[in-house]
Image: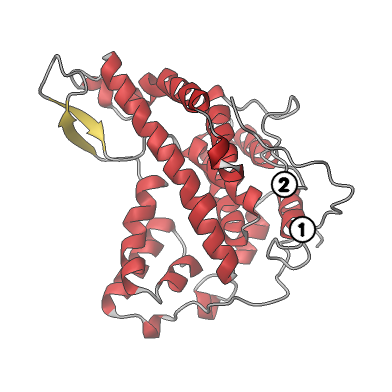
Amino acid sequence: MADELVIPTTGTRVPPLPRARMNPDVEAAYDLSITTWGIPSNLFRTMAHHPTLAITEVPYANSIIFDTGELTDIPNPDTTRGGTVRYPTSGFLDRVTKELVINTVSLLNRSRYSMTHHTVIGYNTLSEHLPHPDPDTRAQQAEAMLLHLVDDHGNPTFDHPEAPPYTDLHLACLRLAAATQAHPHAITDDHIRHTHQVLLDHAPAAITAHGLDQYPDTDTPAYHNAYATGMLVELTWLTVHFSGLLNVWFTVLHTYDEADVTEDEIDFITVYNTTVPASIRRRNNSLLGASGWGDTPNTDPESAPPRTVVTAG
């Protein structure tokens, strides 16, 4: 079918390491990645050529993507009160916002492995966590929100009038993420201040979602400011982890989707084709192009609209 995932014309540049070549510590970390992420991954098996990198990858990646955050004690941000307050170790931003950011920068970079895997993760996450009570409506909203992040030419479209109703939190995070991916030196102090203010406006709801509102001194302006700063750090690190590191790494090494149950322990391509709506698969294929790696997208550069660079809120 035309909307099934385009298959690359060339193979990976670094074959994933098979289990038989992993030492016990790396294999244990690999099994932890499967338990945590739900599938065996060529991300991990490619990293496994560097044992320490592989062993530390799961807790590191979880800290900025999947963890909801354990609670710890920190010195009270309101120094006039003193003492300590409860504070999350991670998970400052909600999972829906994070997946929108991850998908956007991965699409802008046309990074195959991030695009394929986080399209599945993002679609499932949004379908589960968007606030509408009807699951079919949530699935429709998830499709629309992921589809309108960028168009077939890789232009950001989340800010267009015809885009679905992203929240002001979503838009502030997406604008900063797209601007960071495009030209980090062009980001101004005003852009950061504006983003921080939006995060500050949403901090009370996030604090309540963490269950932190039951603890003393978590409803002060100083605490809200500290929490919003944690959100900003998490947002910017998540953005550059994908846009500046993981997307580029996947592209340079041509990290390929898990395709063979015997060798890869899962046929992820079938999972992708049966999970992701056809409209999103077609858009993704346009960005991945004839090569399947995103280096030759299916667009005519002379007829494509000029690339949009988002620089401010």
User: Compared with residue 211, is residue 307 higher up or lower down, i.e. above or below?
Assistant: below
Residue 13 position within the rendered picture, expressed as x and y whole percent measured from the top left: 58, 77
Q: Secondary structure under badge 1?
A: loop
Seen at 54% across and 75% down, the residue is 261
Residue 298 position within the rendered picture, expressed as x and y whole percent measured from the top left: 81, 57
Residue 277: image tag: none
**Callouts 2 and 1 close, C-beta under 8 Å:** yes
- Of the residues under marks 2 and 1, which one precedes in the sequence? 2
User: In which quadrant of the rendered view does residue 296 lie?
Assistant: bottom right
Residue 297: image tag: 1
Residue at the far bottom in the pictured view: 20
Q: Secondary structure under badge 2?
A: loop
Seen at 51% across and 23% down, the residue is 190
Residue 308 position within the rendered picture, expressed as x and y whole percent measured from the top left: 72, 38
Q: Quadrant where the N terminus lies?
A: bottom right
Q: Nearer the viewer, residue 176 or 85?
A: 176
Q: Nearer the viewer, residue 49 or 301?
A: 301
User: Compared with residue 171, is residue 239 higher up or lower down, i.e. above or below?
Assistant: below
User: Compared with residue 286, is residue 175 higher up or lower down, i.e. above or below?
Assistant: above
Q: Which residue is mark 2?
A: 154
Seen at 61% across and 32% down, the residue is 311
User: In which quadrant of the rendered view does residue 199 lie?
Assistant: top left
State whether residue 209 appears in this view.
no
The amino acid type of the residue labelled 2 equals Gly
User: In which quadrant of the rendered view does residue 247 lie?
Assistant: bottom right
Residue at the far left in the pictured view: 83
